[in-house]
Amino acid sequence: MATLEDLARIIGELPEVTEGERYGHPTWAVRGKSIAWLRPFSKADIKRFGDQTPPDPPILAVNTADLHEKEGVLAAGIDGVFTIEHFNNYPAVLIELSVINPGDLRDLLVDAWLAAAPAELVEAFDG
């Protein structure tokens, strides 16, 4: 089970990640390219869950390199990783922090960073 503290620690280990705000929620980027953001469910999202109970907040959205990688991440069956209709055809997955293993969270955040960071930062990163 990962926490917001785990998220902050992992993000803090990634070179040149800055924290900002998007729609009133924390977001993280490397040199202006988004890698992750806290993403609460909208009323429309909750309605789409129907009778199913939505995952518990906080929910983190994490970019993937592309839609192919997104499908691979989802197919891996990592506990706490999912998507919703709003994210169809968008290269990102959602993470229920209270469910995901901190190691899996780190892997997904590092992959998002690697996909967004410029080549010279990636080359210098020891992972």
Image (cartoon, rainbow, N blue to C red):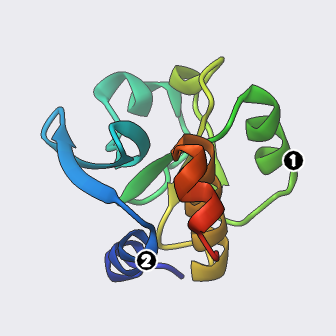
Q: Secondary structure at mark 2?
A: helix
Q: Mark 2 = which residue?
A: 13
- Dividing the picture into quadrants, the one containing residue 19 is bottom left
Q: Secondary structure at mark 1?
A: helix
The answer to whether the residues at label 2 and label 1 have Cβ atoms under 8 Å apart is no
Q: Amino acid at mark 1?
A: Ala
Residue 124, percent across and down? 58, 67
Say which residue appears at 56% left-offset and 26% top-offset.
Answer: 87
Q: Nearer the viewer, residue 9 or 90?
A: 9
Residue 67, percent across and down? 74, 27
Q: Callout 2 environment at 10 Å: few (<14), some (14 to 19), or many (20+)? A: few
* Labelled disc at residue 22: none
Q: Is residue 107 above or below residue 103?
A: above
Residue 36, percent across and down? 43, 48
Q: Quadrant of the C terminus?
A: bottom right
Q: Nearer the viewer, residue 54 or 117?
A: 117
Q: Is residue 14 left or right of residue 4?
A: right
Q: Mark 1 = which residue?
A: 75
Q: Is residue 113 left or right of residue 23?
A: right
Q: Is residue 105 left or right of residue 15?
A: right
Q: Nearer the viewer, residue 123 or 68?
A: 123
